[in-house]
Amino acid sequence: MAAADGDDSLYPIAVLIDELRNEDVQRRFAMLARLGLELLTSSDPPASASQSVGITGVSHGAQPG
């Protein structure tokens, strides 16, 4: 069936709705929401964000020289 018929165009939405019903996905969304609230209420958001995901250093490739 072609996407122009309308049925295939709704498939991604149906898959998304099915995934949102998944308990594991719901737990991940809840974890991200809590992390977001922690970042919003922290006094130093950039440092807290990098520490919370375990980033200790960033390399941008080019070294000053």
Image (cartoon, rainbow, N blue to C red):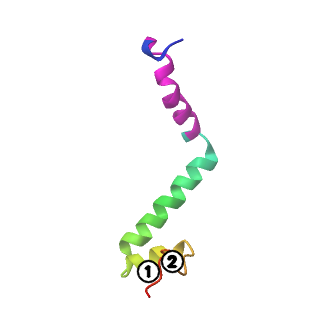
**Cα distance, mark 2 to mark 1?**
13 Å
Residue 50 location, x and y as percent? 49, 75
Give the residue pinned by disc 1: 47
Furthest residue toward bottom: 65
Magenta highlight on residue 44: no
Quadrant (top left, top right, bottom left, bottom right) of the C terminus:
bottom left
Quadrant (top left, top right, bottom left, bottom right) of the N terminus:
top right
Residue type highlighted by circle 1: Ala
Q: Nearer the viewer, residue 29 or 53?
A: 53
Residue 45 placement, left or right of 23: left
Q: Is residue 4 above or below residue 60?
A: above
Residue sitting at 44 percent across and 71 percent down?
38
Residue type highlighted by circle 2: Val
Q: Is residue 8 above or below residue 57?
A: above
Give the residue pinned by disc 2: 58
Residue sitting at 41 percent across and 71 percent down?
39
Extent of the magenta region? 5-19
Residue sitting at 52 percent across and 53 percent down?
29
Magenta highlight on residue 17: yes
Count of marks placed on residues: 2
Residue 49 location, x and y as percent? 46, 73
Label 2 CA crowd tier, 10 Å (few <14, some 14–19, many 20+) = few
Residue 17 location, x and y as percent? 52, 34
